[in-house]
Amino acid sequence: MAAPFDLKDDSVVVVIGTGAGGGVLANELAQKGVSVVALEAGGRYLPEDYVNDEWESFGQLAWLEPRTTSGDWRVAKDFSGLPAWIVKAVGGTSIHWAGASLRFQEHEWKARTTYGNVPGANLLDWPIDGAEMAPWYEKAEAKLGVTRTGDRPGLPGNNNYKVLEAGAKALGYKEVSTGRMAINSIDYDERMPCQQTGFCFQGCKWGAKWSSAYTDIPRGEATGNLEVRDRCHVLRIEHGDDGRVTGVVYADRDGVEQFQAAKVVCVAGNSIESPRLLLNSASSMFPDGLANSSGQVGRNYMRHTTGSVYAVFPEPVRMWRGTTMAGIVQDEARHDPSRGFVGGYEFETLSLGLPFMAAFLDPGAWGREFTSALDGYENMAGLWIVGEDMPQETNRVTLNTEVKDDFGMPVPNVNFDDHPNDVAMRNHAYGRGEALYRAVGATRVFPTPPYPSTHNLGTNRMSENPRDGVVNAHGQSHDVPNLFVSDGSQFTSGAAENPTLTIVALAIRQADHIASELAKGNI
Amino acid sequence: MTSHPRTRGLTRRALLSHAVATVATVTVGANFICAPDAAWALEVTVLKPETMATLILMARDIYPHDRLGDEYYAAAVKGYDAAEEAEAVEAGIAALDAAAAGAGYAAYAAVPWEADRVAILRGMEASPFFQKVRGGLVTGLYNQKEVWPLFGYEGESYSKGGYIKRGFDDIAWL
C-alpha cells in the first residue's frame, strides 16, 4: 500500500520523531520498501524559511513545551524551564546542529572496561564496538557528505578557526584541523558548498549542511512508502495483552486524539521526550512505564561535559563570520587518567551572535565586568568544550505530575548533578582553553558555563544484559519485541564526540535490522 | 529642568549630586522625556516622566555601555509604560529612590557616581523588580538591530551571500 496510510493499517512501522535518528530511519526503511508513518510534533521548515536572526529563529524552531529542571547544574538556575536547546520541527535537531561528525574512539565503546569502577558512575560497555560500527559509520559519512572522509576535502578555516589553530599549535597540539563536518566543501549529493554565512545553528539557508529536513525526509516521501504527519504530538504508546505494542495515540494538528495502528513502533523523540513517552505509556501490565523492567528508562541522562571559553584580543576577530563550528583540536580527546579524570574532550570553535552572547556568556551577570566583555565582542574568539560525562542513575528524566502540558500529560523533569569527573574535566579544559588563547595574545578570557543541553543522551540505554538497560544492540526493547529506540537516548555512554554521526549510523543499521526481521517474519 | 527632585537639605553629598546633574535625560512638558540635545524623545502615557527617566538610568547602570546613547536604553524599557506594568514599576522605582535616600541621596537619579548607584542596585538585586528589569534588558537591549553595529556585529548575512567573498578569513594580525 502506498502513502498516505490508514489509521487502522497495522502493517506500518510508526516512527516517532524525524531528526537525525527518526528521519534517517524512516527514509532508510522506506527505501527498502517498508511502509512508514512518521509522526512529528513540530511543523515543516525548509531552508527558505530559516532566519539569520538568533531570537527569531529560536522562536521558530526551538522545543519550548513546558519542562522543569532540578539538580546542581547551573542550567537549572539560569534556564529553569529550558533544560535543552533542541528543535521541534520536521528534521528535528538536525536543523540546528553544527555539523561535527566524529566517530567514537575504540576505547569509548568499552567505557566500563576502560575506565574501571568510577564511584558514583553507572558505567557500562556498549554491546557493540568500533569494528561492528565501521561499515555503518562509512554509510553515515557518505550520507552526510562528511568532509575529510571518503574523497571529500576539508572546509576552509575562518577567522575564529585561525585563532584556535594558532593557539593550539603554540601549545604544541598536533591534531588541529577544520574537522570532519557534515557541511559541504564542494557540491555533493545535490547540495551546494558552504558560503561561510554563519548562523549554522539557525538552519542552513543554503542547504550546505546536512539535515534530514531536506534530504532523507523528502527522499523517503518520494518512494511512496513514507508518510510524514507534522504537528502530530504522540501522547502514549499502546500495547495488547501479549505485551506487544499495537500503535500510538497522538494529538493531531487540530489537537484531536487519533490512534495509529502499527506493526512496529520506533521512538526517536530525543533523550528527554523519548523516556517521557515510555513513562507516560505506563499500564497495568507495565506499571513503571513501557520497556522499563530494568528501571533504567529515564536514567543515566548525559549531556556531555561542556562549557565554552571566549577570549578577547587587542585586534578584531569577527568570529561570527563563517562556519560556526569551524575547527577542532583533538589532542585532549584521548583517555589519559594522569590529567585527573577518565575519558577525554574536544575543543571545537563556536561563536554566538551578540544577542545570544548577551544571554549565555555569564547568565544573570550585570554591571561593567559583564558589559566590558561584550564591548570586546568584535575582538572575541570562542571555543566549545565537548567531553565525555559520566552516566549516573540519579541524573534522570522523570515525570513531573505537578505540571501538565497542553494535552494534560505530565511534563518531563530533568535532574542533573555534575559528577566529580565532569567537574575535573571541565576545569582542565577551561585551563587549557585559556592557555591556548593566551598563547596568541588574549587579554581577557571567560570560562563560560554550559548552555542548555544540545547533546542529550543515554536515557534508554543499550545493554547486553536486560537488567542493565532498556534496549539491545539493535535498539530493540529488551521487554517489548516490536518496540525500538532510534535516537541518542540509546547511547550506553556518551564518548567525547558530537553524537549525530553515531545516531545516524545506528539508525541506518537499525533500519537494516528491522527490514530484515520484518521480511523473516520475526517481528 | 532636570528630572531629579529637589534636595531636602544641603548635605555635602546632596549638594554634590544636585550640582553634577547626573541624569542625561530631561523631562519636557508633562509627558515627555528627551535627550538634553533633543536628539530623541520618549512620550510616556502612564508612568511619571521622572519614573521613566530613573528607569532608563537604572537600565544603563545594569548594562553600561558608554558607546550606547540613552535612546537605546529608552527603547529597551519603554514597554514598561503600560497600564499593566505601571504599578509595579512605580513601586520599584520608589523602592530604588528609598534605598538611595537611605544612603543619603535625594533620589537614585541624584547619585553622581555609577559605582554608588550600582551599590544601591546590588542591595536590591534579588528583588523581582530588579530581576524583571535585568532579564528584560537581555533581549530588550541586545536584540535591537540598531545597537549591533556599535558592537561590530553584522547580523544577517545570507542576503549578502555570506562571507565567502566578504572576509570570513581576513584576520591579519595573527
Image (cartoon, rainbow, N blue to C red):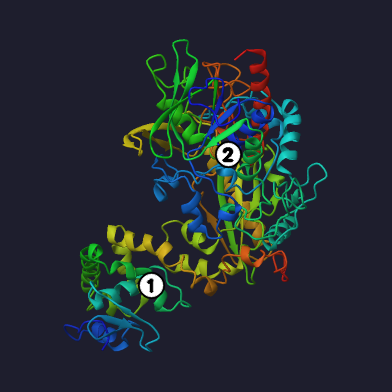
Along the viewing direction, whichever of B70 and A41 lies nearer the viewer: A41
Above or below, A329 relative to A322: above
Left or right placement of residue A300 versus residue B32 in this view: right
Report which quarter residue A439 is drawn in. bottom right
Give the side of residue B73 with respect to residue B109, left or right. right
Which numbered disc covers residue A269? none
Could you tell me which residue is drawn at 57 percent across and 48 percent down?
A96
Residue B116 appears in which quarter of the rendering?
bottom left
Q: What crowding class fits label 1: few (fewer than 14 Cα within 10 Å), some (14-19), or many (20 or more)?
A: some
Q: Secondary structure at mark 2?
A: loop
Which residue shows up at 72% across the image and 39% down it?
Answer: A143
Whole-angstrom CA distance, mark 1 to mark 2, is: 39 Å
The answer to whether A83 is drawn above or below residue A396 in the figure is: below
Q: In the figure, residue B160 lies in which quadrant?
A: bottom right
What is the crowding at mark 2: few (fewer than 14 residues within 10 Å), some, or many (at least 20)?
Answer: many
Front residue of this view, candidates B85 and A228: A228
Q: Position of residue A405 (x, y in %)?
A: 36, 38
Q: Position of residue A333 (x, y in %)?
A: 68, 42
Q: Where does label 2 land, which residue?
A: A19
Q: Position of residue A468 (x, y in %)?
A: 54, 20
Find the residue positioned furthest to the top: A242
Nearest the viewer among A109 and A99 is A99
Hey, what amino acid is under mark 2? Gly
The quarter of the picture where the N terminus of chain A appears is top right
Q: Nearer the viewer, mark 1 or mark 2?
A: 2
Task: Kindly give the residue lying farthest to the right in the view shown.
Answer: A151
Circle 1 sits on which residue?
B75
Establish if A45 lies above or below B80.
above
Chain of residue at mark 1: B
Amino acid type at mark 1: Ala
Specify the subunit that label 2 lies on: A
